[in-house]
Amino acid sequence: MTQASNPQLLSLSESAVRRVNALLADEAAGTMLRISVSGGGCSGFQYGFSFDARHGEDDAIVEQDGIRVVVDNMSLMYVAGSEIDFVEDLIGSSFSLQNPNATASCSCGSSFAV
């Protein structure tokens, strides 16, 4: 397990920090935000966001503003350097990643290619 407060691994925007804190208020103490990457979507890979109370040996943990973000090492290869954002607009609201490793993404932003 790697633990860091290194923004080169992952960072959260102010709006993401506010939203994650609001969601964590309903979760058990020690719950972390998990980011994952899996095959799928129209561009090849898709992001996953969930809450997790546990972490594994192959997980990296990044802490920012009291929020712990956990990501497995395989997914970290695809999202290193990304900023997690929370966006609200007329259509709805969602988390998104500003990913410097992505070479293309679908129009809705839920999948990407490297």
Image (cartoon, rainbow, N blue to C red):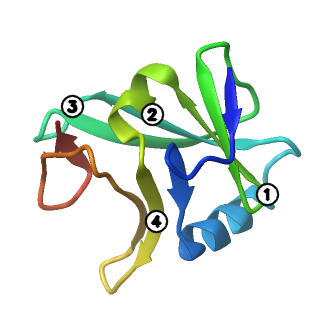
Amino acid type, mark 1: Gly
Tell me the mark number nearer the camera, choosing from 3 and 2: 2
**How many neighbours does mark 1 have within 10 angstroms: few (below 14), some (14-19), or many (20 or more)?**
few
Residue drawn at the location 35% of the way across and 83% of the way down: 89
On the picture, is 57 further left or further right than 114? right
Asked if labels 1 and 3 touch by Cβ distance under 8 angstroms, the answer is: no
- Residue at 79% x, 50% y is 27
Q: Quadrant of residue 90?
A: bottom left
Q: Is 82 on the left-hand or right-hand side of 35?
A: left
Q: Position of residue 82 (x, y in %)?
A: 41, 51
Q: CA distance from mark 4 to mark 3?
A: 21 Å
| C-alpha separation, residue under disc 3 versus residue under disc 2 | 12 Å
Residue 30: mark in rendering: none
Q: Earlier in the sequence, mark 2 or mark 4?
A: 2
Mark pair 1, 2: CA separation: 20 Å
Residue marked by disc 4: 85
- Image quadrant in which the N terminus is located: top right
Q: Secondary structure at mark 4?
A: strand
Q: Are marks 4 and 1 in contact (CB under 8 Å)?
A: no
- For marks 2 and 4, give the CA distance: 15 Å
Real-space Cα separation, disc 3 to disc 1, in angstroms: 31 Å
Q: Quadrant of the C terminus?
A: top left
Q: Is residue 96 left or right of residue 1?
A: left
Q: Judging from the image, what secondary structure is the residue with disc 1 in?
A: loop
Mark 3 or mark 1: whose residue is earlier in sequence: 3
* Residue indicated by mark 1: 66
Q: Amino acid at mark 2?
A: Ser
- Which element carries disc 3, helix, strand or loop? loop
Q: Is residue 19 above or below residue 61?
A: below
Identity, as a three-letter code, of the amino acid under mark 3:
Gly
Q: Position of residue 45 (x, y in %)?
A: 23, 34
Residue at image mark 3: 40
